[in-house]
Image (cartoon, grey):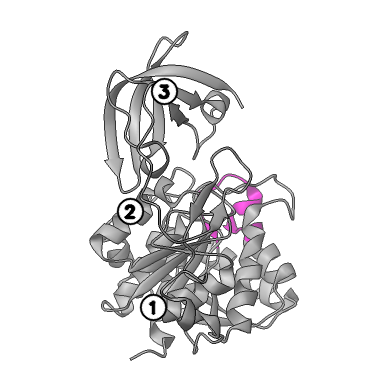
Amino acid sequence: MQWRAGRVVQERRRWSGAVELEVSVEGSPEPVRALAYTAVTGVPAAGERVLLNASALLRGLGTGGLAFVVARTDVLPEDPEVGPGHIVKARYTPLQQMLLAVDEQDSPHHDLLRDADDLDGTPVVVADLHSALPAVVAGVRSARPDARVAYVMTDGGALPAAFSRAVAGLRESGALAACVTVGQAFGGDHEAVTVHTGLLAARHVVGADVVVVAQGPGNVGTGTRWGYSGVAAAEALHAADVLGGRSVASLRVSGADRRERHHGVSHHSTTAYGRALLTPADLPVTTLPDPALDARVRRQVEDLVAGARATLTVVEVDPEGLREALEASPVGLSTMGRGLAEDPAPFLFAAAAGSHAASVSARP
C-alpha cells in the first residue's frame, strides 16, 4: 500500500453509498480524485484531513485508478446503531465490517431460506464483466418491461457495491429490483454468504423474474488462459444448475478490442464456457451490424459449442429493438473505455442474453 495524507478541497459528486472528492495531497501539483464509502467513513467535509490509499492511483490503473479514503484523521464517524448480524466481510483486513446476511439466523428471511433449495426454473444470466449488467437489464426490459431483475454481485472485482455507479443508477431508476452482494462483496440491498444463497435470496426474497450474476467493477486478467477473475462465471452457472435455475451464459464479444484474444468472442468466454463449465447452459447470440464481425463470431461460437465439455444450446435472438433498448438505458454503457457507438457488439450480445432470459422466465 502507498499511503498519502491530504485535505479535502471539495465534493465532486455522490451516489448511493459513495462520495467522490477532490483532495489536495502534499507533493502533488494538482488535486487528486478520492472516493469515500459513506458506510465506512461518513462524508468528509471540505477542509478535513484524510488518510488515503493511493496505490491504484499511482499505478495509473483503469477502473480503480483513484485514491480511496481510509480514514478522516480529525473526525471519527459516529458508531452505527447496533443491530443484528454477525457475518464479517472483508474479513481480517483493517476495514472488515460486521453485516446482517439475508440467510443468517438473525435475519427476518432466515426461516424462508433455511430449507430453500430450488430456483423454480428462474433464468440466471451470468456475465464475465460488470459492464454487461446494464445491457443485460436493458435486454430483459425490452422483452418484458415489468420484469423484476435482481443482481447477484460476486467478489471477483470490486468488493463494495457502492463503487458501481451503474448499480446505483439502475436501482434509483427502478430497472433493478435489488442487488445481493455475496462472498466478500458487501453493500448490496441484501448480503449473502455464498452465490447459492444469493441466488435463492434473489428468487425467494426479492421475487426476481430474472437474476443477473457478475463480478463487481474491476475485472482482473493476466493475459493467460486461466488467470482472470471472470473464470468464476462457470461456477456461478454450476450454482444456478444445481439449484434448478435456467442457466444463460452471456458471451463476451467485441469488435473494437485490439487484443486478438478478445476480438470477436473473448477467450474469457471460450475458457469459462468451453473448458470450465460442466453443466448445460443456453448461449444466446444475435446478429451484429458488421457482417464481417458477425461471421467471425458465429464461427467462434460453432467452435466453442463443438469443443465444450458441457451442452451449450445456441439460441438465436432477434436483434430488433435491442439497440433502442440499450440507447434507453438509465445508466451509461461503457466497457473497456468504449461505449455503444464505438463497440456495439458487447452490449448487443449482453442485451440478447437478457432478452432470452425474459422470454423463458417461468414467473407469470
Range drawn in magenta:
252-268
Report the mark closest to the observer, 1 or 3: 3
Structural distance between the alpha carbons of marks 2 and 3: 25 Å
Reply above or below: 40 against 153: above
**x and y, in percent, of residue 133 in the image:** 43, 61
Asked if the stretch drawn in magenta spans residue 273, the answer is no
* Residue on which the image places disc 3: 50
The residue pinned by badge 1 equals 208
Residue at the disc numbered 2? 168
> Counting residues from the N terminus, which is met first, the one under dot 2 or under dot 1?
2
Which corner quadrant of the image does residue 300 belong to? bottom right
Which residue type does callout 2 highlight? Ala
Mark 1 surroundings: few (<14), some (14-19) or many (≥20) residues within 10 A: many
Judge whether residue 345 can be spotted in this image: no
Is 198 on the left or on the right of 331, as rendered?
Answer: right
First in sequence, mark 1 or 3: give its number. Answer: 3
Measured in 3D between alpha carbons, the distance from the residue under mark 1 to the one under mark 3, in whole angstroms, is 41 Å
Q: Position of residue 13 (x, y in %)?
A: 27, 36
In the image, taking residue 332 as reference, residue 271 lies left or right, namely right
Disc 2 and disc 1: Cα gap in Å? 18 Å
Query: Which amino acid is tagged 3?
Result: Val
Q: Nearer the viewer, residue 315 or 43?
A: 43
The residue positioned 75% from the left and 75% from the top of the image is: 307
